[in-house]
Amino acid sequence: MSQQSIFRDGLFADKTILVSGGGTGIGRATARELAALGANVILCSRAPEHLEPTRAEIEAAGGHAMALPCNIRDPEAVEALFAAISERYGAVDGLVNNAGGQFLSPAEAITPKGWHAVVETNLTGTFYMCKAALAHGMRQRGGAIVNIVMEMWRGFPGMAHSGAARAGVVNLTQSLAVEWARYGVRVNAVAPGLIASSGLKQYPPVIQAQFTSIAADVPAQRMGTEGEIAAAVLYLLSPAAAFVSGTTLKVDGAGSLYRLQGYVVPEHAPWPAWSGDEDDGTDVSRSSRHDVGHVQADHREGANPEGVNRPQEQ
Ligand code: ADE
């Protein structure tokens, strides 16, 4: 394991940090960097086969890692997880709620079972983990919690269940930040944009290709990396963020401010309009995005002295 970090050696020495979904993707990248900086890392996931390779990789590099399977949707399993951690390490100093999952589906086709599975994993499971972390040490010793959500600021068409659950986690983050400030517990979230993570490979090739094409609409002109999300998580766990709580840090190459959404609204009849004055002459019968010319600014030096970057005068 050749783990590079922007943070100083030993930053997390003697700290015990639990990373859910720590065996793969963003969770694995976070666990590896934490271990490289001296943390005792505990990896948990519902799928034990995801954990062992990452645990072994961290140990082989001289780090400390423990793997504990746990279904975060089951409150008793979460209690048992924290009891096992208490026995071995005392308590956790940091918790990264990264475990989650969703599937692509139009909202109208999501069954009650599918809805509950996604919301219980991403939102309810995160709540169980936060609550257990408080009860098993953070109430006495303080700590830092980082919840991984996703870019869903304009809804998440195609994965409405996950968008709703992640929005719930952002709000939960704010509530806990205020309620648990008295215990010295900071609670923050990280919202990754389009990330070239191993999770992306779980989607069918046609969807993967769609994600790749969306990257052209990200101002940064590329996807993000798992390491860029891990760095944001480590910052929020670290003393550099000692005055930061209740925030959601977007790590998205400015994509949420600009990019067209991957979801394309199917062709359909324009909605009936309401004017109140039938004779006002306004025609809103159809406007197509193809009718709208794109204004291109010319950024070359000296170009466009009176150009399109100037605000239009009224
Ligand atoms: N990763 C995805 N779903 C999970 C769950 N229910 N518990 C733990 N890790 C998970």
Image (spheres, helix red, strand yellow):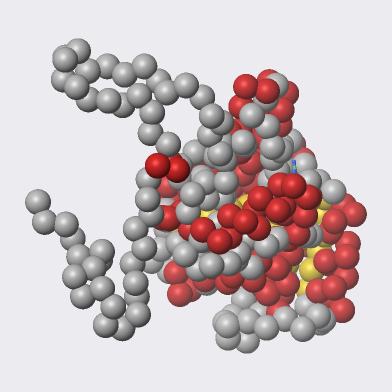
110 with respect to 181 (left or right):
right
What residue is rendered at 58% in x and 67% in y? 222
Q: Does 240 sit above or below residue 178?
A: below
Q: Is residue 19 above or below residue 59?
A: above
Residue 67 or 298: which is nearer the viewer? 298
Q: Residue 143 at x, y = what percent? A: 54, 61
Image quadrant where one finds the N terminus? bottom right
Q: Nearer the viewer, residue 167 or 142?
A: 167
Residue 165 is drawn in which quadrant?
top right
Q: Is residue 54 visible?
A: yes
Residue 137 seen in the figure: no
Total labels: the figure holds 0
Indicate the quadrant of ligand 1 in the picture: top right
Residue at the (63%, 41%) spot, across then down = 122
Q: Residue 160: percent from the left, percent from the top? A: 58, 33
Q: Nearer the viewer, residue 88 or 208?
A: 208
Residue found farthest to the left = 314
Q: Percent position (x, y) of residue 151?
A: 52, 50
- With respect to residue 114, does 206 lie above or below? below
Q: Is residue 302 above or below residue 231?
A: below
> What residue appears at the point 53 percent right and 67 percent down from the top-left corner?
221
Query: Left of 292 or right of it: where is 60?
Result: right
Report whether 199 appears left or right of 165: right
Tell me which residue sits at (65%, 58%) in the image.
Answer: 212
The answer to which image quadrant residue 240 occupies is: bottom left
Residue 98 in picture, x, y percent from top left = 65, 53
